[in-house]
Amino acid sequence: MLFLDSFAVSCQSPRMALDIKICGLKTDKALAAALAGGASHVGFIFFAKSPRYIEPAEAGRLREAAIGKAKAVAVTVDAGDAFLDEIVEKMQPDMLQLHGSETPERVAEIKGRYGLPVMKALPVSEAADLERTRPFVGIADRFLFDAKPPKGSELPGGNGIAFDWRVLAGLDADVDYMLSGGLNAANIGDAFRLANPPGLDISSGVESAPGVKDPALIEQFFRAVRAARDNRAA
């Protein structure tokens, strides 16, 4: 069984209790929109090839506005200790997200080094891919299931593509995770209907261009989440 402190948000309705992470934030306006919508988590990307890359010191400045409102997540891809040291020192994240090819041993090492909860991202395209969670059980505090990147992509996530969410229906109820990949206001109802995930992670689905978060799209996404959840509860 996986354990994680509850970071659920109400999204202005008791029926809306679920975690929502707006990831790849770089500006005050985008962060403000995420917090206003009720995000439980806000993510900052530390992968140089990503259009959402942000310097650790700037992420640290932005995350101050989220203190007491949302958990700040540092997203890294196979980062070395020196870079992780810099991120943790300058940003002071509440959680680390490991989005690369980190082994269970590396995840345990990072947890021990920083004393922070860790979310391990795993690429998914079919039900068999979920078996990759097993070695991380008891080590990772949470999983993030993202679509496998398209051939030739240098980005492990944030590609705006989805996988077949129906494969998540077979997951053990004790597996705590966030659903990522291709989410947007138009398909969030399908995500709830097919997978009913305990958490959502969205990045490119609230952008007007790669790496450019649109506050209006963030607001639209939260409205769509509330509407979809209300429809299911009706």
Image: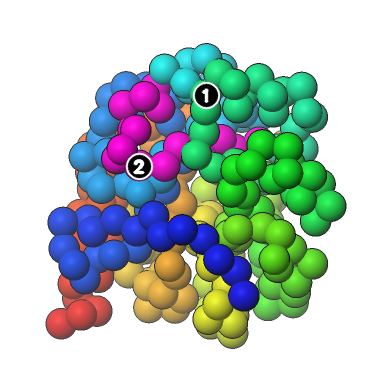
Residue 7 point in image, percent of width and height: 39, 55
Mark 1 → mark 2, Cα distance in angstroms: 14 Å
Magenta includes 233? no
Assess disc 1: are there few (<14), some (14-19) or many (≥20) residues with their C-alpha within 10 Å of its C-alpha: many
Residue 134 or residue 22, whichever sits in front = 134
The residue singled out by tag 1 in the image is: 91
Residue at 32%, 47% in the rendered image:
39
Q: Secondary structure at mark 2?
A: loop
Q: Secondary structure at mark 1?
A: helix
Assess disc 2: are there few (<14), some (14-19) or many (≥20) residues with their C-alpha within 10 Å of its C-alpha: many
Residue 200 falls in image quadrant: bottom left
- What count of labels does the image hold? 2
Q: Amino acid at mark 2?
A: Ala
Q: Is the C-beta separation of discs 1 and 2 under 8 Å?
A: no
Residue 26 point in image, percent of width and height: 43, 24
Q: Amino acid at mark 1?
A: Met
Left or right placement of residue 227 versus residue 62 in this view: left
Q: Earlier in the sequence, mark 1 or mark 2?
A: 2
Residue at 48%, 29% in the rendered image:
211
Span of residues in magenta: 62-76
Magenta includes 73? yes
Q: Can residue 164 be seen at all in this image of the molecule?
A: no
Q: Quadrant of the N terminus?
A: bottom right
Which numbered circle lies on residue 4? none
Left or right placement of residue 16 versus residue 177 in this view: left
Residue at 52%, 61% in the rendered image:
4
The residue singled out by tag 2 in the image is: 70
Residue 160 point in image, percent of width and height: 52, 48
Residue 48 point in image, percent of width and height: 67, 24
Residue 220 or residue 37, whichever sits in front = 37
Q: Can residue 110 be seen at all in this image of the molecule?
A: yes
Residue at 46%, 58% in the rendered image:
5
